[in-house]
Image: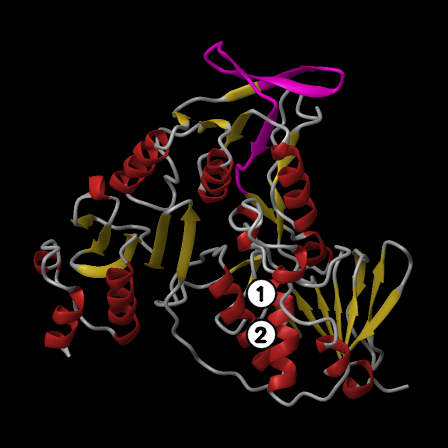
Amino acid sequence: MPLSEHEAGTLVVGASQAGAQLVTSLRQLGDTAPITLVGAEAHAPYQRPPLSKEFLAGMATPETLAFRSPTFYPDHDIELVCGERVEEIALPRDDRPGVARTASGRELPFARLALTVGARPRRLDVPGADLGGILYLRDLDDAVALRDQLAGASRVVVVGGGFVGLEAAAAARAMDKQVTVVEAADRLVGRAVAPVVSEFYRGAHERRGSTVLLATGVVGFQGTAGRVEAVLLADGRSLPADLVMVGIGVIPRVELAEQLGLECDGGIVVDAHARTSAPSVVAAGDCTVQPHPMTGDGRVRLESVPSAVAQATLAATTLLGREVSTRSVPWFWSNQGDLKLQIAGLSTGFDEAVVRGNPDSESFSVLYYRTGQLLAVDAVNSPADYLAVRKALTHGLPLPADRVADAGTPLKSLLTAAA
């Protein structure tokens, strides 16, 4: 029987932020073919960023995290399959539909394929890593376990000084837990921000009562009765711990892509239209590496909600043959208690960083430049600076490095003059 796109429709593997956006975009663009969204988790698609913030703090529930009401998917003729992990995919060929097979043996036919499979936590491979009380935070079940166990813990060790680790540390400290952050690098969130921002966050967390250990490796865990009691450090020290949260990054899920023979390089390689090396397959979200969203150069992997949404929307237009060209400014945020960090742009490769305001006031921003060209901003409790730089990057407006250091001059006024 000849392959009918309308009969077989689109299969989206991965009920992630990108997956939920992709199926929604297909319907918004007028696609009437069948759509199946399949995810390994038992939950319908939900927001992940609040897991390390509002959810741990008890200000969010699984119900409030859901992207859509339970009736959204059937109302829009989207088949949502939860609790099924796809293990094998055969692409369409010889006028026959493709087929994805799940671990339970279920077969899902398709004419068009999208991979939005996300990433999994990087595991710490040291002695004792399998003890109870050592937790990771990636999905809703992880967050539920962490929140439940935090309630009964008094000494919390966070391994990893990235954004997720610091957000979890802030939440634990707000519960009056004894918190120690252990970071192997010589500064916090070193891959994402300038040293002045790293130093600010170290001091800010310590002012709030946490201990921050830099350039310190974890070599093992000790415990009795199957539960962690201590974290062993490379310098010979031992930290007492009732609970350990490990946040040392993620690994893109590329297994299905590799099985299909797609190009992978630190993630599933896609072009500016979310196409993989197989033109009939698109991918979006944390599992991908893509051209720089502003310049089109190189390859970057962006772990953020805005990036996943933008890329999934592009993937939907590509699947429908409505290829569009976009230039978008990446943006991110991290809420660590009362510290609100907003980032616009990508600071990678900067050769100059201009500080506006006094970090000691806990309201300041850092603007990044390369050869005089504005790249990005980190704004801590400074939303006006964030919005101004995001506007400048979006519209290509200049903010000269020699004029932005004066915190008394609103960046908005410089933009108005430039316009």
Q: Residue 144: x and y, percent?
A: 67, 44
Q: Quadrant of residue 312?
A: bottom right
* Residue matched to label 1: 284
From the image, which quarter does the N terminus lie in?
bottom right
Mark 1: give few (<14), some (14-19) or many (20+) Cα within 10 Å.
Answer: many
- Prevalent SS, magenta region: strand
Which residue: 51% across, 48% down? 53
Q: Quadrant of residue 376?
A: bottom left
Q: Are marks 2 and 1 in contact (CB under 8 Å)?
A: yes
Q: Nearer the viewer, residue 257 or 221?
A: 221
Which range is magenta? Answer: 220-249
Q: Nearer the viewer, residue 267 or 374?
A: 374
User: Of helix, strand and loop, which one carries label 2?
Assistant: helix
| Circle count | 2
In the picture, the disc for residue 315 is 2
Which residue: 21% across, 55% down? 369
